[in-house]
Every structure is written in structure tokens, then in C-alpha cells.
Amino acid sequence: MQEGDKKKGIKLGALMIFLFLLMYIPSLFHWIYGKDIPTDIIRSGIVEDSFNVDGFIIRDEELIESPFEGKYIPEVGEGEKVPAKCKVATILKGTSAKDLEKLSELDSKILQLQKDKSEKEGLFSQDLIKLENNISEKVVSIAVACNENNYDKLEDVRHEIDDIIHKRAEILGSMGTSDSEIDALKLQRNNLQAQINSGTKQIYGNSPGIISYNIDGFEQLFNPKDIGSIKADDIIELSKKEIKPLVNVGNVEINKPFAKIIKGIYMYIVVAMDKKKADMLYLGNNVNIRINDINKVVNAVPTSISDPVGDYCTVVFKTDKALSDTTFLRKINIDVIKNSYEGLEVSNKSLFDISPDGKKAKIVLVKVNEASIRNVRIVGRNGEFAIITSDDKDKQVSLYDIYVINPTNIKEGQLIIK
């Protein structure tokens, strides 16, 4: 091969290499710098600065006891407000409950007999009318025979009347139930009703308030007068236990409570709280509490923070919300929400170069497949998310912008293929 041909071959090879690099270097660059870079979209959200804790509800509760053993019938629904002297339940002795079943059976039997009697009377009424008419005709024949002194005919008519009366008796007999049988059952029913009434008592509440049939046995321990004596260690131990009603629904024991009236407009929530978290609260300053058992947020005020014993303090919150919604609860799980922030929500992992006061940071946006570093202001955050706003008029951060979740080693202008 001549020297000129070699040079041409080298030039052609160099051109091929150049074209190859021109085509594949961007892909190689993306493979090195843009591979597996997770991104997300800036959304509108709410971030809460909160912590979770178990607690117990304290209420001013007036217990209602049963005068005897048996069953109760609620007259008011759970959680309903009632005035003073309102009928809240009917108590039945154990025997009364059985008598009620007998009473129902007697009512059904009396109704059935009356129905059968009525139906049969309707079925045979036309036959009875015909027989009565026949008897009337025969009576006239007897009078005629007597006037004629026709004793043979008189005897025949008498036999005919006897036959008619016999047929009438047969029809009445086939009609079944007599009034006396029904009357006897009614008398039996009235006697049983009187017996039931003697074993039944209407129960009235003394005070106005909210009715509850959930008795858990902590009504004496958890009352507003003794809040100051509740210790954090006691709360921690009680939190480990499962709290259930003391009696089965519908059953009552003599001189034992089966219902209660929740008086007043306030309830208290007592918790055992880590002293570092308790230090973040201030007496009289409002906080929001989410009662997770009913998924409801209520406004509350810390009214008592005890001195720490070990690592825990006893904290009491006071609220006038959700009394009717929590009558069936004693032990609850709550989130104490110190602050709540709303705005542009991003992952905490996306923020870097955070200022010492935690109020400023940087974030990487993806603009036309390139990294764009923006300055932001941190409005608030928790362990997972942050609420941010733009801190640079020229380089704004907006809703639905795409941002890099983990910006480690990402440079300004770096190619990022979504």
C-alpha cells in the first residue's frame, strides 16, 4: 500500500472515530452522570411538627347503678345529650326478661285464635243464617199444626227442628275457639303483665350531660378532682393494658353501675411525656391534638406539666371538643401537633447546604434535562418532608417543578434525563 493511501486510511479512521464520539459521548455522559437519579414533583402539602403518645381521657362522670340484677334497655343513644331527670334506661329483673318472652308468646296465641275465629265465622255465617230461617219456618208450622189439632204433623215438625238445632250445634262446634278460651288467655296475659311490671324499673339520670353505657372501671381513678395525683409511671403501666367494659352489654348487677352521665363541657387528656418534648409545651398555649382513634383534630390547652420523674413528665391537656365522639373511649392514642405548615412540599433529602439556623437551603431542579440549583427558604419541616418557598426572585421554585431527591455530587448544568 502506498504512503498516500495510508494517509487517506488514517484520515478516514479518524473521521469515523470522531463521528462515533460525537454520537455516543452524550449517551456516555448521561450513563456516567445522569443514570438512576431519582426525581419527584413539588406538590402542595401540609407538614406537621408533631409527636405521638398514648394517653387517657378524664371526665366528670356521674355513675348510675342498677337496683337489681337483670337486663337493661337503653332509652337514649350512646353519646347523646340529655337534660336533668331524663329517663335513660329500663331495668328488668332476670325473671322479667323470661316473662317478656312468655308475654310475647301469649300475644301471638291470642291474635292467632282471634284470627281463626273470625275467619271461621265468616265461612259458616251463611249456613247459620239458613238454619235460623229454617227454625223460624218450623215454628210457624208448629203453630199451624196446633190450630189444626194435627198432632202427627206437630211431632214431625218437632223432629225437624231438633235436626236443625243439631246441625247448628255441629257448625258452631267446628268453628273451634270460643270466646271463653280467648278470655282465659287474656286473663293469663294480664296477670303476667302485672308480674312483669313489678320486676321493672325506669331509671332516670340526676344531672344534665352526655349519656354513656360504657363502664370501664376507671371512673373513680380518672376524675378531674384527682388529676394532680396521677403519676407518669402509672400512666405508662396502664398504657400496656387492654381496657374493656366490666359488664356485658345489656346485663346489669345489683348495686353496680351500668351507665354514666358525663357532666360539664370539658374533658382532659393525661399523658406520660418525655421531658424534652414536654419542654416544648407552654401552659395555656393552644396546641392541636389529633385523636387517632376517631381521626379527629381538636384544639387543646396544656393545663398541667409535672416535674420530671426520671425521663417523663405528666402532662394534662384540656379541651371542650369531641366529648360525644369519645364516650366509648378511655385509653387513646394522640398526635400532639406543635406546628403545622402549608405550601410547597419536598422531601427533606432534597435539601442541602442548610444554614445553621435551619431556615435556608438549596435544592436541585431539573430544567430542560439539566440541573438547576435554586436557593430556598424553609418554612417548616418534620422528619420526612419540608415546606419551602423561593429565596431568589430570579430563580423561582414553583408548584409541579421537578426536583432531585438526592442531590449529592450533582453539579449546576449537569445533564439529567428524566
Image (cartoon, helix red, strand yellow):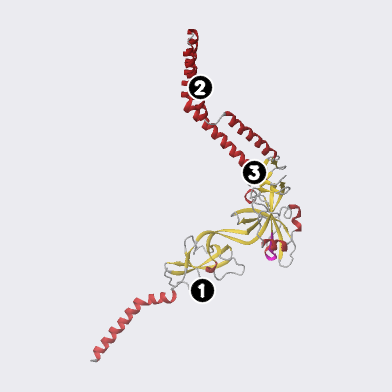
Give the percent coordinates (x, y) of residue 141.
47, 13
Is 315 left or right of 390, judged from the image as shown?
A: right
Question: What mark, if any, has residue 408 been given in the picture?
Answer: 1
> In this figure, which residue is indicated by the disc labeled 2?
165
In terms of sequence position, does the residue under pointer 1 or pointer 3 come before the other?
Answer: 3
- Mark 2: secondary structure: helix
Q: Which residues are magenta?
A: 271-276
Quarter in which the N terminus is drawn = bottom left
- Mark 1: secondary structure: loop
For the residue pair 196 and 392, the one nearer the viewer reads as 196
Give the percent coordinates (x, y) of residue 90.
67, 42
Image vertical order of residue 155 relative to residue 284, above or below: above
Mark 2 to mark 3: distance in Å?
49 Å
Q: Of circles 2 and 3, which is in front?
A: 2
The answer to the question of whether label 1 and label 2 lie on touching residues, with beta carbons closer than 8 A, is no
For the residue pair 394 and 137, the one nearer the viewer reads as 137
Quarter in which the C terminus is drawn = bottom left
Q: Is residue 159 visible?
A: yes
Is 30 left or right of 361, judged from the image as shown?
A: left
- Mark 3: secondary structure: helix
Label 3: few (<14), some (14–19) or many (≥20) C-alpha neighbours in 10 Å: some
Is 55 left or right of 369, judged from the image as shown?
A: right
> In this figure, which residue is indicated by the disc labeled 3?
97
Q: Of circles 1 and 2, which is in front?
A: 2
For the residue pair 160 and 196, the one nearer the viewer reads as 160
For the residue pair 292 and 176, the one nearer the viewer reads as 176
The amino acid beneath tag 2 is: Ile
Give the percent coordinates (x, y) of residue 334.
63, 58
In terms of sequence position, does the residue under pointer 2 or pointer 3 come before the other?
Answer: 3
Mark 1 to mark 2: distance in Å?
115 Å
